[in-house]
Amino acid sequence: MSELVEWQFKDHNGSMVLFDMCTNLTLEEAFKTKQKTKIKINNEVYNADPERQKAVSANRNNYMELHRKDLKGDALPLPSCWEDMKSSLVKLFAVAPGSKEYNDVKKELTKTGLNPNIITIERVQNPALWQNYQILKKQMEAKNKHTNNERLLFHGTGANSIDLINKQGFNRSYAGAHGNQKLVLQQINIKLLLILRSKMNNYSLHVLGI
C-alpha cells in the first residue's frame, strides 16, 4: 500500500485547509519524485514545491505554506470483501456472478431503467484512495452533523480515462463522452464508481470500491 498522507495549506487567516483528493494525490506524487507541480488554491493557479512545502501563485503575488501529514498510523481497515493485492497499489478483481456484491451492483444499474447484458463486473481495489475517502467522509459527517452524505449518480467520461480514474480517483474533468461509449456511476465522494464499457448493448463494469 502506498503511504497515506494528507496535504494541507495555511490560508491567510492562519488556518490549515485540506486539499481535495486529486490535489492531495498530485502533491504526493510530486513529493515522492522530488518535482514541482501546478495546483489550484481558491481557483488560482500556484506553482507548488512539495519538497520545500511551499506554493507561489503564477503571478507571484501570493505565497502559501504547505504541510504534509503522515496518516499511516491512523489507517482504517480495508473492506472485508477485498482480496489480497500482493503488494500492488491498484488491482482489479472479477466479481463472481450471482454473489451479493454482483447482484447489488446490477440492482443499482437496473434501477436507472437500463437493462444491459453485463459481460463482467470488476472491483477496483485502491487502498490509498479508499483510506483518503474514509477520512474525507468522516470530516463531512462532522461538518454536516449527519451521516446521510452519499448518493448515486451517473456521469459520462472519456474512454481513455479508466486507468487514471482507477489510480487517481474521479473528478469532473473526465466528463465528455456520453451515450453508448462510456457511463460512470459514482457515489458521492467516490465511494462507489462503476465504469460501463458499452459495445452495442453489452457492458463491462468496473467497480471502484474506494
Image: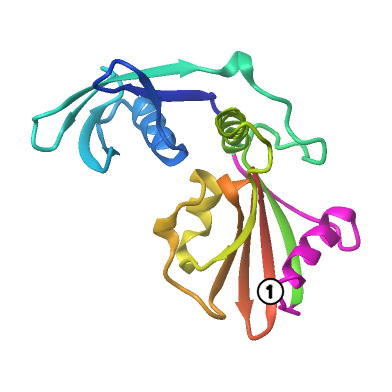
Residue, disc 1: 203
Q: Quadrant of the C terminus?
A: top right
The image quarter containing residue 26 is top left
Q: Secondary structure at mark 1?
A: strand
Residue in front for this viewpoint, 107 or 194:
107
Identified at 70% across, 34% down, the residue is 86
Is-magenta flag for residue 123?
no
| Image location of residue 90, percent across then percent down | 60, 42
Identified at 59% across, 49% down, the residue is 188
Q: In the rendered view, would you say 40 is above or below 193?
A: above
User: The magenta stretch spans which residues?
Assistant: 90-116
Q: Quadrant of the N terminus?
A: top right
| Image location of residue 182, percent across then percent down | 55, 72
**At label 1, which amino acid type do we have?**
Tyr
| Image location of residue 122, percent across then percent down | 72, 57
The image quarter containing residue 179 is bottom right
Identified at 60% across, 61% down, the residue is 153
Residue in front for this viewpoint, 197 or 150:
150
Residue farthest toward the front in the current orientation of the protein: 145
- Residue 108 as seen in the image, left or right of residue 90: right
- Residue 24 as seen in the image, left or right of residue 195: left
- Residue 121 as seen in the image, left or right of residue 6: right
- Residue 79 as seen in the image, left or right of residue 37: right
| Image location of residue 167, percent across then percent down | 52, 45
Is-magenta flag for residue 92?
yes
**Crowd band around label 1 with a 10 angstrom C-alpha radius: few (<14), some (14–19), many (20+):** many
